[in-house]
Amino acid sequence: MAKRGSSSRARGDKPDALAALQAANEELRAKLTDIQIELQQEKSKVSKLEREKNQEVKQIKEHEQHKSTVVVTELKVKLHEDKMKELQAVRETLLRQHEAELLRVIKIKDNEIQRLQTLLNAVRDGGPDKVKTVLLTEAKEEAKKGFEVEKIKMQQEISELKGAKKQVEEALTMVIQADKMKAAEIRSVYHLHQEEITRIKRECEREIRRLMEEIKFKDRAVFVLERELGVRAGHAQRLQLQKEALDEQLSQLKESDRHLSSPKRELPYASGAGDASDHSGSPEQQLDEKDARRFQLKIAELSGIIRKLEDRNALLSEERNELLKRLREAESQYKPILDKNKRLSRKNEELSHALRRMENKLKFVTQENIAMRQRTGAIRRPSSLNDLDHSQEEREVDFLRLQVIEQQNIIDELSKTLETAGYVKSVMERDKLLRFRKQRKKMTRIPKKPVVETFYGYDEEASLESDGSSISYQTDRTDQTPCTPEDDLEEGMAKEETELRFRQLTMEYQALQRAYALLQEQVGGTLDAEREVKTREQLQAEIHRSQAQIEDLEKALAEQGQDMKWIEEKQALYRRNQELVEKIRQMEAEEARLKHDVQDVKDQNELLEFRILELEERERRSPAINFHHGPFTEGKSPLQVYCEAEGVTDIVVAELMKKLDILGDNANLTNEEQVVIIQARTVLTLAEKWLQQIEVTESALQQKMLDLENEKELFSKQKGYLDDELDFRKQSLDQAHKQILELEAMLYDALQQEAGAKISELLSEEEKEKLKSAVEQWKRQVMSELRERDAQILRERMELIQHAQQRIKELEERIEGQKRQIKELEEKLSFFGHSPSGHMHKESSKRKQKVSPGRCPHLGEREHESHRAEPGRLAQELEGKESSGKTGEEGEIQKKFQSVIDHVGSTAKHRNAGLRGKARTEARSEEKDQG
């Protein structure tokens, strides 16, 4: 009963608790709705406040922007006015300087004109004879001076050229000797290469033949085995058919036995007939069982033989594949030898081209030799004493003799080269013939009948058509199959080789005949060596005879008592004339060489300028790298130094490496952990090596930079020296040209005067026109010089103006940079100012109006510095105040910040005004210095 009461009580309490929970839930829901409403109201208030704040910020920004635009426009107007004033001042000063320069030049020209007029009056008073004498004496003196100076210069240059010529000749002899030695070395190396090539070819051919013989032997063995396998397979198939036939016979016999045995079972009482049938059927069954056993044994034997043959076939196929691989390897090894052979054939073609060039040179030399012989034939003999050209003839004969000796040497060298080339060709052709003969001896084989695979084996009468039973192999001579005969082919190859050899020989013979015919045509008859020797001996005998006659005549004159001095004087005069002619030629050649040298120097100067510009451009583009790093200390590793440079001082690389070694040797770790540790250690060692390599490359780059700097300095020195030399040469030429023009102009003015009328009458019209043109040219030159001076002055002035404009642009850029700084400060203010009031804005605008734009009288330098340092501190204060929520202090801080910004704007304006004043003073000082 008590239990029932307690359960009824619990049932009564449950609805009360549920009702209380529902009431509490409804109350909480109502509170939640109230809170949500309040939250929405707060959000709307916050959004309204943010909108108001954004509007105020926008108004402040627009106001500040308007003020800044006004200030910028005022500054631009002031700058434009200052610029125009400065330009006007510069223009006025330049005009004054130009006018003063023009007046100075006019005064100089007037003085020059007055001096020339006085000279002309003096000349007019003195008369034409005096003018003639004065002009002639002046011209003679100037010509003498110029001639002596030029003579000294030319003598010095001749001595220098002689020394240079000797040096060049010595260098040429050295180069010729070195070329000859090099040619001999190349010939020897060529012969050695040819011998090596022939040896390699022989070895390769032997190896290829050996491999081909092995392949042929293996192919024959495979062919025989395949044939046997085919025969055995046909035999096995026949046995299989026989077995199947026997099986069928056995099955028939068994069926007949069953039919015979069935009546015994049905009639067991007929005992006599059953016994007879048993006696009659037992021997036939025994025979059938024996045949069946025999056939089964045969079938087992045949299956074993078939397995053996299959195994052997597999082995043979493997051997065949290996042989094919070896053949491919041999072909791949033979390919570089073929490439080498092709390269050597190309070299042979180049040598043949060189031989042709040498043959052409030989033809040219023979032509020169013939022309020299004709000259020697045209030399006439001395007939009298007046013909005193004996010394010159002797010189010419000696010169011709030397040329003949040189040409003979060249011909001998060419013949040697031709012999060596012919020897090389003959050796190569002999090797080819020997190779073909060996191939003919080795490659003799008995022709076989073709064999083909059929269903029951291989048939020798059919043609071989299947791809599986034949192997096609290829050599460098023939493509053969196991069934093709080779004797006819070898004979055909030998015939073709002999025909080719015969054609080559006939072509060489025809070429030699053509060369011989050309030589005969050039000589003008048959070319005979004996005749050449005879003509040379005759000429030498005639020369000796003429020398003896001259000596006899000189002795006769001495005995008669006649004087030999006039003959010696005549010879001396002749020699002197010859020397002077040679000197004139040398001077002309020297002049041409000097012109060529001047042109070369100009070209070299241009190249050096281009190189210097390139180096300057490279130096300008390349970043400023400091290569002067200290080397690594001995106790530290490069990785440790790099870690310390990066700021990681806790890690010691040596201890880390030791720990990694210990951990790698630790047996408690797993294999993966040990592998990771070993990999980390290898990475560290590689990093150290890489850093060492970087150090080496850094030192190499530093050395390269030093070399480049030295090269640049050397180039600049060379350029300066060449510029100076060019300027000196140009100045000397211009001065000489000016003197010539001035003299011609003076002469023309003298001829135009009344006193020089007679002299002008003596001159021809061409000379008068020449003088007129010279005077006009002189006038044009003077005017061009004046214009050049004026243009140079104007260029200098324009450069000054451009410099001033550039200075003004720099100042404008500085002002714009300061404006950007001001804008950044204003943006920071707008970022930090969260709730500015309208009253605050008005106060700040009043303060701005009170502060003058050009100066800040109530702040000193220390206050400026404190205000410059204030924005960051004020920003921190603003952030702190925002977190705490104290709005009153925010207003005070914002007021301070606004006053700081006003002060920064005023100081910036004051600084801009100071910079403009400095720029003006600097421009004026530069103008004064240049004026």
Image (spheres, rainbow, N blue to C red):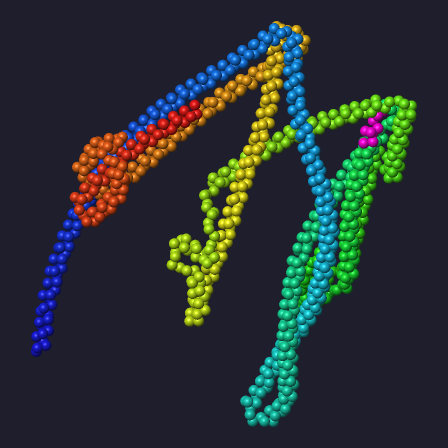
In terms of depth relative to the viewer, which is nearer, 165 or 252? Answer: 165
Name the residue rendered at 56%, 94% in the picture: 269
Counting from the top left corner in percent of width and height, residue 529 is at 86, 39
Name the quadrant containing residue 7.
bottom left
Q: Is residue 224 magenta?
A: no
Name the residue rendered at 71%, 60% in the picture: 208
Left or right for 339, reference 831: right
- From which residue to which does the magenta span run? 387-395
In terms of depth relative to the viewer, which is nearer, 543 or 141? Answer: 141
Name the quadrant containing residue 887.
top left
Q: Is residue 388 magenta?
A: yes
Q: Main SS of the magenta segment? A: helix
Counting from the top left corner in percent of width and height, residue 690 is at 49, 55
Left or right for 566, reference 11: right
Counting from the top left corner in percent of width and height, residue 49 is at 19, 43
In terms of depth relative to the viewer, which is nearer, 98 or 9? Answer: 98
**Quarter in which the N terminus is drawn:** bottom left
**Quarter in which the C terminus is drawn:** top left
Q: How many marks?
A: 0
Would you say residue 572 is visible in this rendering? yes
Left or right for 255, reference 636: right
Q: Is residue 270 above or below residue 140?
A: below
Left or right for 406, reference 342: right
Q: Is residue 606 above or below residue 146?
A: below
Would you say residue 273 is visible in this rendering? no
Counting from the top left corner in percent of width and height, residue 263 is at 57, 88
